[in-house]
Amino acid sequence: MGPHRTIFSARASICCPRVARCAWQGYLYGTAPNDFLRESVDLLPQGRALCLAEGAGRNAVYLASKGYDVSSIDLTKAGVAKTLRLAADRHATVIAIVGDLAIADVGA
């Protein structure tokens, strides 16, 4: 489905509401991008996009479908799996990794 890399921390294994939400099989917020992104995307220059704490991937996949080179990071393996599944379903390419933003090197 695409590149996948893991940046693991013990925090990702702790039972928390975010982990429980991502473990659910469906798309809690749907598969359409959030309204702000959808209404603002034409104001963004084309190029690379980094989606942080991406969850199930709806915004990353939307940007990829608009021609952006998208990378995303999420705390949960389930969130990354959903991102990659949605990207494949939409014939989009997203590089999605599991990582803890508190310790991840996002190349800033």
Image (cartoon, grey):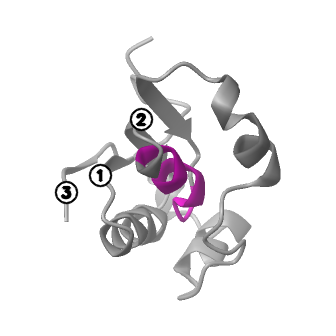
Relative vertical location of residue 32 with respect to residue 70 in this rendering, above or below: below
User: Which residue is drawn at the image coordinates 47% and 61% (left, top)?
Assistant: 76
Specify which label sits upstream in the sequence, 1 or 3.
3
| In-image side of 98 versus 21 (left or right) | left
Residue 100 % position (x, y):
49, 41
Specify whether residue 37 is painted magenta: no
Amino acid found under the numbered disc labelled 2: Tyr
Say above or below: 8 vs 31: above
Asked if disc 1 and disc 3 are in contact, CB closer than 8 Å, the reply is yes
Left or right: residue 37 versus residue 50 is: right
Residue 35, given in percent of the width and then of the height, sits at: 80, 52
Residue 104: x, y in percent? 42, 30
Residue located at (38% from left, 38% from top): 71
Q: Secondary structure at mark 1?
A: loop
Disc 1 marks which residue?
93
Q: Residue 23, located in which quarter of the rendered image?
A: bottom right
Nearest to the eye among marks 2 and 3: give it: 2
Main SS of the magenta segment?
Answer: helix
- Give the magenta range: 55-64
Query: Which label number is shown at residue 68?
Result: 2
Q: Residues within 10 Å of mark 1 (few under 14, many from 20)?
A: many
User: 56 left or right of 96?
Assistant: right
Residue type at mark 1: give it.
Thr
